Image: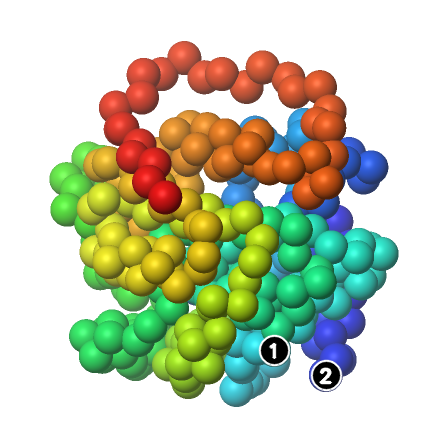
Amino acid sequence: MGTTEAADGTRIHFRQIGRSDAEPLLMIQGLGTDSRGWVMQTLAFGSRFHCVAPDNRGVGRSDKPAGPYRLEQMADDAIAVLDELGIESAHVMGASMGGVIAQMIAVLHPERVRSLVLSCTACSHHDWRRELFDEWATMALSQGMRPFITRNLRWLMGNRSLRRLQPVYHFVGPIAVTVPVHSFAAQVYALLDQDDSIKLRLGEIDVPTLIVVGSQDVLTPVGDSEEIAARIRGSRLAVIRGAAHGVMFENFRLFNQTVLSFYDTLPAEILAPRAEVIDLTLPAPLEAVVDLTG
């Protein structure tokens, strides 16, 4: 674990998992979620990568200033973490809002990115999603985080029974419920303030890119990932059947397998020879099927 200071003095906390001499992997989480949201990935990737997972401003152990926040600011926060660790470039992975931040890093700081993994994310606004996010901020500010989480978990998990929702609620809930409502709202408004400037520059990204989405994602549907894939030349799109917006923990085995398979394809000059990988196989069947296209 460690802390660095952003340009405006905000302290940004980060977690480190894995060997410090391994390939660096910067992992950026989404709205209202901190670095603990990557626990299912760091367990699998930590034997192969130097995983660096910051808490975005406003969540986790990072400072929670009053705001407003900007996504470009959060991208710079992540770069400050790399600078603190003396990492010139890293593989970058982002989920949901973290995927938008990862796109920004790849466009605005291309020299810092070796490869890119974008999960359950988007590059465009839709009117329905703008209205939804505005409702989220209003509800959190007026009712608090716990009622907000209970009423909106379906956006994370899609069409699921209560029985299937419970394990995810117990995973996500304790993280999100600790987020102050002012910083959650500030993150929401940062998303709403984002324009199309990064989307229009996605064609400049020239590093190997994998885009992962669940077939039942209702918050950032498959069409959002298809749009990103169409804009980033040579990118690959993986659709994990049966998964929703929480694909990285709902279907973590298949998500991890898909991402690690992508890293296996990277040229030697991008990905150094990997360290010995411990056996992380878990005794549970995979019900989902992954489609790889591109």
Residue toward you, 140 or 228: 228
Residue visible at 64% across and 37% down in the picture: 267
Crowding at dot 1, Cα within 10 Å, few <14 / some 14-19 / many 20+, comes out as some
Q: Which residue is mark 1?
A: 73
Q: Nearer the viewer, residue 280 or 182?
A: 280
Q: Are marks 1 and 2 in contact (CB under 8 Å)?
A: yes
Q: Residue furthest front?
A: 233
Query: From mark 1 to mark 2, how far is it between C-alphas?
Result: 9 Å
Q: Which residue is mark 2?
A: 8
Give the quadrant of residue 148.
bottom left
The relative height of residue 227 versus residue 242 in the rendered view (above or below) is below
Q: Amino acid at mark 2?
A: Asp
| Residue 31, image x, y percentages | 44, 64
- Left or right for 65, reference 259: right
Number of the front mark, 1 or 2 = 1
- Residue 52 is at least partly visible in this image: no
Residue in view at x 66 percent, y 51 percent: 114
Quadrant position of the C terminus in the picture: top left
The secondary structure type at the circle numbered 1 is: helix
Taking the image as shown, residue 238 lies to the left or right of residue 269, namely left
Answer above or below: position of 78 versus 156: below
Residue type (three-letter) at the residue carrying disc 1: Gln
